[in-house]
């Protein structure tokens, strides 16, 4: 479990340049930057897991990619994207007062 968690944490560290460039250099909105981070996390983790595709459970097992606690990193990436899409809809909604 520790090996998967270390890889997962390294993945989060690896996407820090995306956050820096998106937020500080390009001055993108937070939902856009965070969605790029979530997509990058998902992509990196799925690339690691594709090496073990013939194995049973390659998409969810801790030995085949990054984990945070007990969930694969790609799930965290999708959650980050979903939360930021919802945030963008709420923030820029024409129905908002």
Image (cartoon, rainbow, N blue to C red):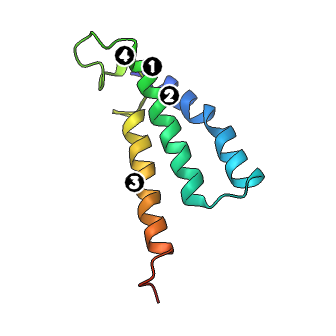
Looking at the image, tell me whether mark 1 or mark 4 is earlier in sequence order.
1
In the picture, the quarter occupied by the N terminus is top left
Looking at the image, tell me whether mark 3 or mark 1 is earlier in sequence order.
1
CA distance separating discs 1 and 2 = 6 Å
CA distance separating discs 3 and 1 = 22 Å
Circle 3 Cα neighbour tier, 10 Å, few/some/many (<14 / 14–19 / ≥20): some
Residue 8 in the image: x percent, y percent?
49, 29
Looking at the image, tell me whether mark 3 or mark 2 is earlier in sequence order.
2
Indicate which label's residue lies in the foreground, 4 or 2: 2
Looking at the image, tell me whether mark 4 or mark 2 is earlier in sequence order.
2
According to the picture, the residue beneath numbered tag 1 turns out to be 48
Horizontal side of residue 75 vs 12, given as left or right: left
Compared to residue 88, the image places residue 70 above or below, namely above
Q: Residue at x 39, y 19 (%)?
A: 49
According to the picture, the residue beneath numbered tag 2 turns out to be 44
Residue 63 is tagged as 4
Q: Secondary structure at mark 4?
A: helix
Callout 1 touching callout 2 (CB < 8 Å): yes
CA distance separating discs 3 and 4 = 26 Å
CA distance separating discs 1 and 4 = 10 Å
Callout 3 touching callout 1 (CB < 8 Å): no
Compared to residue 70, the image places residue 22 above or below, namely below
Pick the residue in front: 8 or 50.
50
Report which quarter residue 13 is drawn in.
top right
The single residue placed furthest to the bottom in the displayed view is: 97
Residue 64 in the image: x percent, y percent?
37, 17
Circle 1 Cα neighbour tier, 10 Å, few/some/many (<14 / 14–19 / ≥20): some
Residue 78 in the image: x percent, y percent?
39, 44
Callout 4 touching callout 2 (CB < 8 Å): no
Horizontal side of residue 14 vs 94, given as left or right: right
According to the picture, the residue beneath numbered tag 3 turns out to be 82
């Amino acid at each position: 479990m520790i090996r998967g968690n270390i890889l997962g944490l390294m993945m989060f560290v690896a996407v820090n340049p995306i956050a820096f460039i998106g937020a500080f250099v390009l001055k993108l909105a937070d939902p856009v930057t965070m969605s790029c981070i979530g997509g990058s996390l998902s992509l990196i983790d799925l690339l690691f897991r594709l090496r073990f595709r013939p194995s049973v459970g390659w998409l969810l097992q801790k030995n085949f990619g990054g984990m945070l606690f007990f969930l694969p990193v790609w799930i965290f990436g999708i959650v980050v994207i979903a939360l930021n899409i919802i945030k963008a809809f709420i923030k820029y909604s024409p129905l908002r007062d």
